[in-house]
Image (cartoon, rainbow, N blue to C red):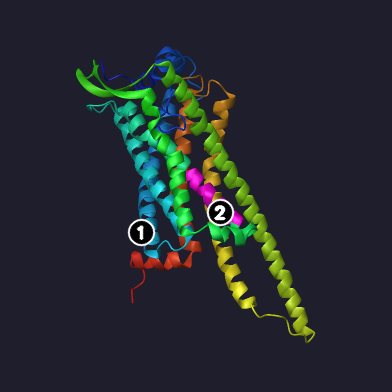
Amino acid sequence: MYEQSRGEDSITRFPALGHMTDNPFHSWEDHGKDSSLLTLASGILSDEQFYIIILFIIFTSQLINICAIIANSLSIAVFVKLGFSEPSNISLTALAICDFILAVLLTWNNLCFLLAYHNVRLPFDSANVSVLTGGVQWMFLSRTVAWITAFISFERCLCILVPLKVKRLMTPRGTFIAMLIIILFTFGPSFFPYIRYKFVWVFNPYLNITILNTIPVNSEFAILFEKIYLVIFGVILPLLAFSIVLICTVLLVLQLRKISSWRMSVTSDKSQRVQLGETPAASSSAGEARISQKEKRLVRKVIAIATIFILSYIPTVIMLVCGVVFDDFNSYGVYSRLFFLSGYVTSLGQNISGSVNILVYYKMASKFRSVFRRLVRLDRQK
């Protein structure tokens, strides 16, 4: 009896199928009431197509998770060796640590889904339990990554626009405090879902054993509290962080082009003076050129990181907007399968972003590249 056919019955066995989406906290009781929607209006995809695509995404995600774990481990090791005298190293280290943890959580979520899909007998409901042991943490930590990226973009944008004022504020200590505030504000509330859901031991008639599962707390306070924090942390904060990154990236690109045009005009003016026999005032031009080149490299690195984030976060933004516009775009509505598929795609995109940042560091930071090559023994240490 426990070995049911996959398809509509698989959906019934996985009420927490959205555990890796950006809204994993749907109501189990609502799923029970509206489960007919999942079978009568399963969406565009058939049962077989749906599960083939989901399994393909999961296996692809697992490979990317391994790459992300290795890449961010190396990034953290390199930044530790570089030290934290520069504020940018502190924020980039925090970003690498969060990306590393995201990859670990996503690996656990994928594994739980595969165990549930293949009917592996376990002392816990892997699909439901993974929501409170991985899905919750993944969603809140992805907001942390978004806001750290927003901080990096905003800080670099201010350094270009008002450099003298920012340099007095953006010290290593100030950056460290800012990282702590962001982490506490975005990831600290990850205990909120435990007010709405809790772990219980329930008897499973299919396995004929008692297993660990999760059930909702149906108090009015818990339900209202869930709606409030889902709006704040599920919609408002990620969209606001995305907007900040997008605006700051555009400003950085425009400012970088403006600086490049100005320097070309200055260089052209100096060459004309030399041809006319005049002596240009170049007392500090060499020092200014060195500073500008270093600043330009750092700005380009931030632009590259922000651009990768924007591209990988666009599916999440689309999913959040669809969830606001369409009432049935949720884990138990008419478009449930499209919702689940979108959730897996968004998690995959964000994980790709965290795994390729090391390529940006290696390409655009000479100190990082030098320490990295020595760390993996590509260069001999003198």
Whole-percent x, y for residue 374 in the image: 36, 68
Location of residue 77 by image quarter: bottom left
The three-letter amino acid code for the residue at tag 1 is Ala
Q: Is residue 57 visible?
A: no
Location of residue 256 by image quarter: bottom right
Residue 153, magenta (yes or no)? yes
Q: Is residue 330 visible?
A: yes
Asked if residue 232 lies left or right of residue 33, the reply is right
Q: Which residue is mark 1?
A: 77
Numbered range of the magenta stretch: 145-158
Residue 155 marker: 2
Helix or strand or loop: what does disc 2 sit on? helix
The three-letter amino acid code for the residue at tag 2 is Glu
Residue 267, magenta (yes or no)? no
Q: Is the N terminus in the top left, top right, bottom left or bottom right quadrant? A: top left
Helix or strand or loop: what does disc 1 sit on? helix
For label 1, count other residues whose C-alpha is less than 10 Å away and answer few (under 14), some (14-19) or many (20+): some
